Image (cartoon, coloured by chain):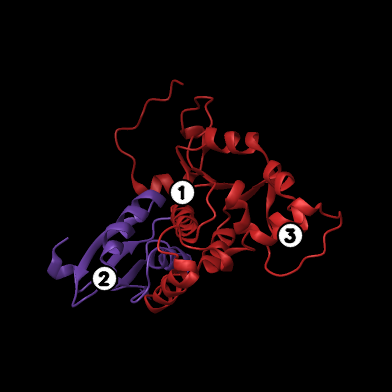
Amino acid sequence: MQAQTMSQQKADKVVDARGMACPGPLLEAKRAMASVPIRGVMEVISSDEGTATDVPLWAKKVGHEYLGTVADAGFWRIFVRRMK
Amino acid sequence: MASAALPTVLPHEITTGAEAGSVPATGEPKVEGLSMVVFSGELDKVLAAFIIANGAAAMDLPVHMFFTFWGLNVLRRNGAVHVARKKTTMESMFGAMMPKGVDHLHLSELNMAGLGTRLMKREMAKKHVDTLAHLVKTAQEQGVQLIACTMTMDLMGIRKEELIEGITLGNVASFIDAADRSRISLFI
């Protein structure tokens, strides 16, 4: 997906994990996903650059669809679609 | 099995059926998971162990952590615990000299008689790195299995009642069994 369209992506659930250190954002993402409807979208906001690498890997591993990442000023917005 | 593989599998087809029959049965148990020997009892090493364990659990891997030797101290309760069976002098000495649980571990480097550990904990709090106590709790909530080595317990005179809640007791076979069923195995 294009970066431009990605930044317009709507989310059913936003997890603001800014300021958290590993493994915080990942655990928050996992916890929050339970309250996202199937095929709904979760947005994880993290100020830890490693999260932008890790959340897509987590999504792939547990069977969700990684949609894309938008880099903002000092933080990253990572979008994942719940698949199960 | 004679079932011909489908050329493509759509995501919704994976999630809706949950039919075991659609997966070719090989007779082999699924080998996936993380097993760990936690031998060290130092704050930094044990932190690493629990960060890995929590990450693996978040990625849906079954996780087994086997605590032996100095690592056993991680599972000790803080404060005085009445033990049913009286300890020998040697056992009492071990008990008094070793750290009582997660809040009393020291760094493996730059400890500087405890000063380095205190500074590191302060820095961790400032930078929102989870405390070890919190990581242990989260691991247990995520279903990580914590196994205490009974040989070490016996050797050092540490009794079950001195350990935190939710600990399984086991020996080498417990670890080998978990390791045999996991793709990742670490010694920390």
Q: Quadrant of residue B167?
A: bottom right
Element on which disc 3 rests: helix
Task: Identify which residue, A46 or A63, lies in the foreground.
Answer: A46
Which residue is under mark 1?
Answer: B16
* Host chain of mark 2: A
Please tell me which residue is depicted at 50% across the width and 38% down the height of the picture.
Answer: B182
The amino acid on which the numbered mark 2 sits, given as a three-letter code, is Arg
Give the residue at x 42% y 25%: B3
Picture quadrant of residue A16: bottom left
Which chain appears red?
Answer: B
Question: Foreground mark, 3 or 1?
Answer: 3
According to the picture, the residue beneath numbered tag 2 turns out to be A77
**Does B128 appear above or below B70?**
below
* Amino acid beneath label 3: Glu
Q: Position of residue B179 (x, y in %)?
A: 53, 36
Q: Residue at x 69, y 61 (%)?
A: B96
Q: Nearer the viewer, mark 1 or mark 2?
A: 2
Q: Nearer the viewer, residue B148 or B35?
A: B148
> Are callouts 3 and 1 both on one chain?
yes
Q: Characterize the local packing of mark 2: few (<14), some (14-19) or many (20 or more) Cα atoms within 10 angstroms.
A: many
Q: Up-down: is B25 above or below B124?
A: above
Label 1 chain ID: B
- The number of callouts visible is 3
- Label 1 sits on what residue type? Thr
Same chain? Circles 3 and 2: no
